[in-house]
Structure formats: structure tokens, C-alpha cells
Amino acid sequence: MSEESEAKETPESVQRVSSYSLAVIFGTLILAFICLALALLTYSSKVGITTTGVVFLVIGFAGLISATYMLIQARGHMMHIKIEIPPVMTTVACQKCGFKNVRTFERGDYVFKQAGPCPKCSDKLLVSAIYREVKEKPKKEMF
């Protein structure tokens, strides 16, 4: 398995459902269970079936259905999101002649690491920078 495919499976690359969305979903679930409990209480009373009990029952089941739908949609949306991790680049430079080379990051690279001889002056090359190369997305026009 290559390093790129391993990097895509890390927990950092998975985007999660926002806490606000989860609060709305669980709030809806709690209210739905309260309505169902009130409907059960009105049906168990000696009065029998009333319009209040029916209303609580309908609201409770509608709340359960909507909360379940929101959970399924949030989970399904998260499964389709692909996050592209930008490549990590290493800049290697010669202190003597100013030669610079940009290459992909290799495991074990660190700043000021000696990276071999310079192809121009045969002095030592040093890793001068390690960074992620971020590609800017084209902006969409609204109109």
C-alpha cells in the first residue's frame, strides 16, 4: 500500500458531522420521545382516546422519522466526501552557489538535513523548507 493511500485513510482526513447538526438531531429525538410518552400517558388514563393523545402520537412519530432521516442523510453525506490531501514538498538548496531544487517529501526529511552534493559546485545541499503545496480552487461566479 502506498503512502498516499494510507494518508487518505487517516482519521485526520475524515470530516465529521457538525456538533450543531448533532444537537438538532438529538434534540428532535428527545422531543419525539417526550411526545410519545405523553401520548402513552393520555391513552393509559381513564379518559380513553382523546385528540390530545392523537396529536402527541403523531408529533412523536413525525419527530422520530425526521430525526432518523437527518441521521441517515448526515452519515450518507459524510461517506461521499473525498478530501484530497495536498502533496508535501521539500526544497533543497546549496548555500554556496544558490542552486535550488523542489522535490516531493521523503520520509526522514527535516530542515537543515544534508541532502547530498550540489550538482553545480559539489558543495553540500541542505533541506531549506518543507511545506504543503496547496492548489487554489477556481472561484465560481454567482451570476
Image: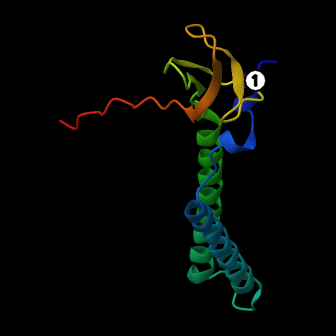
Q: How many marks?
A: 1
In the visual, does 108 lie left or right of 131? right
Task: Locate residue 18: give its quadrant.
Answer: bottom right
Q: Secondary structure at mark 1?
A: helix
- Residue drawn at 64 percent across, 50 percent down: 16
In the visual, does 143 lie left or right of 75? left
What amino acid is at disc 1?
Glu
Residue 104 visible within the image: yes
Give the residue at the far bottom of this rendering: 46
Q: Nearer the viewer, residue 43 or 31?
A: 31
| Crowd rating for badge 1 (residues with CA inside 10 Å; few <14, some 14–19, many 20+) | few
Indicate the quadrant containing the C terminus: top left, top right, bottom left or bottom right: top left
Q: Position of residue 42 (x, y in %)?
A: 69, 85
Indicate the quadrant containing the N terminus: top left, top right, bottom left or bottom right: top right
Q: Position of residue 40 (x, y in %)?
A: 74, 79
Q: Is residue 106 above or below residue 120?
A: below
Residue 82 visible within the image: no
Give the residue at the far top of this rendering: 119
Q: Is residue 116 above or below residue 55?
A: above
Give the residue at the far right of this rendering: 1
- Residue drawn at 59 percent across, 46 percent down: 73
> How is this picture coloured?
rainbow
Q: Position of residue 78 (x, y in %)?
A: 62, 41
Circle 1 sits on which residue?
A: 3
